[in-house]
Structure formats: C-alpha cells, structure tokens
Amino acid sequence: MRLTTYLRERQWTTVFGYLLFVALMVAGYYYNLTFVQLGLIDLGTRLVGMSETAVSAWMAALALCTLLVAVVTGVTMDRRGWSTDVRTKLRLLFGVVCVQFALTLVAPHVRTVPAFGAWIVAASVGLGVGFPVSFSLAIDLVPVPDRGYVAAAITAIAYFAANAVPLSWSIDVFSRLMTAAMAPGLVVLAVLASGRVTRVEAVLSELGGQHREFGRGRFCYPDPVRARSLAFAVPVVLMFGVFFVDSLGFLRIIDTPSLLLSSWQSPDLATRWVIAVAHVLGAVMAGVIYVNYPMNRVFLWTFALFALTHVLYTSDLRVAAVFPTLTAGSSSPLNPAFYAVAVSFYTTLNFALWPDISTPETIGTHSAIGIGVAGWLATFTSTALALYFQATELPLLSHLNVVQALSLLLLFGLAVGLYVRRMVEIAGADGGATA
C-alpha cells in the first residue's frame, strides 16, 4: 500500500509510523551532518588548539571506533532478535539520544586533548549503536514501495534546514541548537520507550507486527541478499566511493572563501535558498528514479553529477588563473546547485538502500556494515585526508583535481561494470538457447 491509501483509509497508526521514522532520521542526519562533521573540526582546532593533522587523526579514530561498535551492535541485534522488536529498538535509541544530549552539552567546554579523545570515544559508542538501530526501524514503519519517497523526504527536509537556516559553523552554535532540538525529542522517546502509556502501547503493538509484511527488502527477491555476497559488497563499495568523493571535495570547498561565499555560507540569503531548493529537487528526482528504476540508475546519475560538478569547479579555477579580471575570483552559482543535486541523489539512495537489501533477520548487520563502511568510514577517512591536504598546503586546484579524477573513475568504472555484466547475461542467454 502507498501512503495515500493509508490516508484514505484513515490508518493513522501507519501514518504515525511514517512520521516517526522521518522525524528520527532527519534529526539524526542533521546532527551528524552539522554537529559531528563540522562542529568537531571547529572544536579540535579552535578550542582545543590542535593542528588540522591531529584533528584529522582523531576524526579517523572516530570513524573506526564507530564502525566497530556498529558492527557489534548490528550483529547482536540480529542474533538476539532485537531487529524485529520495535520496543527494544526504541529503548536503545532513547539511551543513545541521552548519551548524545549529554555529549552535546559538554562539547563546547572541552579544552584539552585527553578530554577531546574521551569525548570522541564516547561519541563513537553512541553513534555506533544509533545508526543500525534507527535504520532497522524502516522494516517496522515504512512499506517497501514507499521507501524511495520517504528517503527523499528525509533528505529534502534535512538539507533544506541545513542550508536555508543561516548558522555560524562553530561548536558553540551547534551545541545550543542541538540541545534545544533534542530536549523535546528526548521526552517523546521516553514516552515511547516507557511501556506505561496504554494508548502508545497499543500503537506500538500494531507497528511491531508490520515487519512481517514490510521486512523483506525490494532487492531480496527471489533470494535474500547475504552480507558475504557480491550483491551486498558492490553497493557498499559504490556508496563508500560516493561518500568519500563528496566529503573530500566539500571540506576543501567550504574552507575556501571565494567558493564558500557564493555557496553554503553565502551572506546572500537568495543564494542559500537556491541551494536549499536544489537539494529538495534533487531528493525528489532521486526518490522517483529509485522507486521506478534499478539502484544502478541512481548510482550512475550520482557519479555523473559529481563528475560534472567538479569539472565545473576546476574549469572555473583554471579560467580564473588565466583571466582573473573576468572571473573576479568567484565561483559560478550553478556549481553549488549541481553539487546539491548530486548530494541529494546519493543521500536519498543511502536512506532507502540498506533496508531494501535486507530482511528482518539481517537488517541490523547490513545497515551496520553499510552505513559504517560506506558512510562513516568513508566520510571521516576523506575528512582526515582533506585536513591532511590542507596541512601540507596542497593547492586548491590540485586538491579538486584529485576529487574530479576519483569521481570520473567511479563513473567510468560503474559504466564498464554494467556493460560487462550485461554482456555476460546476453552470452549466458545465447548459450542456453543454443544448447
């Protein structure tokens, strides 16, 4: 059934499940996108006083610890049956948000390297438990046919808020914003996890049985996808590549005033709104393509958009070097718009993909490995590499050339892989017909 069907039939419990999942995922992604990825860099360099190279090492440690905790959590969830118990997942999520709330409060007061390291370890535990638990809620709350659209909604809301609302990218600002936003969320999760509110328990009982209908993902037919199979490994590698390329380029762009002022932190509100709207449009397009076409189409579009975006950025820089008076050192406003569309494409795919290559018995493990490797490990290893490039004073054009080369390599590699696979399928069909 689709969401419109549920609305027509007034099945408000299922609609509540949609809204709950969207709210949880938007909040979690916005927290990771702003407070963790951007705020920790400011905390380490400005308040603690570490070098960018030292911060990059700690960010890599955060990624590795988070991955380890996530895999342990995901495997444990599947083996103990927690992946199909919505109440257990909500209780775990409540504990995670409590830890993150406390860490968010104390973060601006961290001033020493040992304290920063202890904060990183504690944060990695919360993050590592949090994302397999939250992603596994998809099998309880979102029907398979609607996952692309729900993923698009999560992406659109999170990025629109991140771009349209002007904020200073400092740990102090992020901490105040997040604690204010997390406080009501804690109350709601406490009610859901308490088991003492009769009406809430009735709703959870209904939602808790939906995994029998919603649990088996779109790509698990005719056979379930296994973690050790090529059908799982290929999406993980592709998602790792796209997260890595995005972060490696983004962190250098936002550290370059001539590029930043015409994009994500532009003082011109109109520019920020253009980027916010581009994110929404990209998410909508990605959701429609995901629902109606194979996942490879979304990957191809994503890699093509990233390749085009970085070609545009590097072309602008080359033109600026030759004709400085013509360009006046500013980047085209189309560049961040294309970038926003590309980011929305892969983010939408990321939210929908892992539940769709899982079953109720594997969702914990698959989401832990998928997000841990393709998301966190890729993002923070590329963050570490980007900071290292800056510390070694690698020129901007050389840095973006590396990103451009990687994006073109991923696009070309995926196209060749799809071509070879199709040739093998045709050869196999012809061989069967001949026999």
Image (cartoon, rainbow, N blue to C red):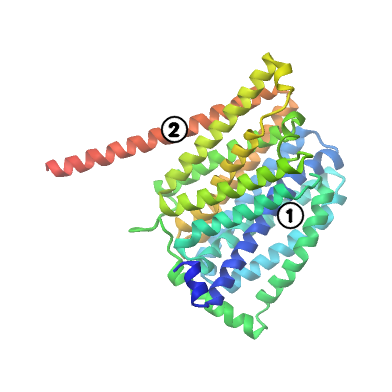
Q: Amino acid at mark 1?
A: Ala
- Which of pointers 1 and 2 indicates the residue nearer the eye? 2
- Which numbered disc covers residue 122? 1
Please identify the quadrant where the C terminus is shown.
Answer: top left
Query: Looking at the picture, how far across and down is residue 80, in whole percent?
Result: 52, 68
Q: Is residue 247 above or below residue 16?
A: above
Q: Is residue 365 above or below residue 379?
A: below
Q: Nearer the viewer, residue 340 or 107?
A: 340
Q: Amino acid at mark 2?
A: Gly
In the rendered view, does 367 fall on the left or right side of 424? right
The residue most toward the bottom is 198
Which residue occupies 85% across, 49% down?
110
Nearer the N terminus, badge 1 or badge 2?
A: 1
Query: Looking at the picture, how far across and down is residue 230, in whole percent?
Result: 40, 46
Q: Is residue 373 visible?
A: no
Query: Looking at the picture, how far across and down is residue 89, in whole percent?
Result: 60, 68
The residue most toward the top is 322
Q: Nearer the viewer, residue 327 or 156?
A: 327
In the rendered view, does 37 fall on the left or right side of 75? right
Q: Nearer the viewer, residue 344 or 251?
A: 344
Which residue occupies 67% across, 83% down?
197
Describe the element under mark 2 as helix, strand or loop.
helix
In the rendered view, does 323 fall on the left or right side of 83? right
Q: Nearer the viewer, residue 225 or 148?
A: 148
Q: Residues within 10 Å of mark 1 (few under 14, many from 20)?
A: some
- Residue identified by numbered label 2: 413
Residue 255 location, quadrant: top right
- In three-dimensional space, the C-alpha distance between marks 1 and 2, rounded to whole angstroms, equals 38 Å
